[in-house]
Amino acid sequence: MHQSRSSCPETRSDRMSDDPITPQELQATTQELQLTRSQVQAVASQVNEISLTLEALSTQDESRPVFRAVGNLLLEVGDRETLAKDLEESKVVFESHLERLVKRESALTTQYGEMVKSFEGQ
């Protein structure tokens, strides 16, 4: 079902390239770019946190206990290898998501720049 123009702003790729850019379209792209940048920062922070955790886990003396936060509880970890494997898998997932977000951010940055030039040239 197609929504009306007022309820769903079109993206630049949905429009004819000769159509003038509206302030609303420019604002929507700006907001999407800001949201994407925020997501990039949050996911990059998660990747960094997991990396630091894996590093700390690898240097922790085997005779000392390791704990994992589960909700408001700290639970002792019985199997460090499984924990490390779980963390590595999470890191891979976050890195993949980060890569997609960075590509989207780059595309939006390019789109935004083109829209600004077009808008200013109107």
Image (tube, grey):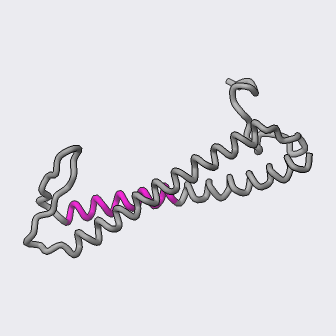
Count the labels in the image.
0
Q: Residue at x 35, y 67 (%)?
A: 51
On the rendered image, what quadrant is the N terminus found in? top right
Query: Residue 95's x, y, as percent?
Result: 45, 61
Query: Residue 62's x, y, as percent?
Result: 12, 73
Q: Residue furthest left?
A: 63
Q: Residue at x 53, y 60 (%)?
A: 99
Left or right of 46: which side holds 119? right
Q: Is residue 103 magenta?
A: no
Q: Say which of 53 and 18 sits in front.
A: 53
Q: Say which of 28 and 96 sits in front.
A: 28
Q: Is residue 91 magenta?
A: yes
Q: Residue at x 46, y 55 (%)?
A: 43
> Magenta segment, principal secondary structure?
helix
Q: Which residues are magenta?
A: 81-98
Left or right of 71: which side holds 112? right
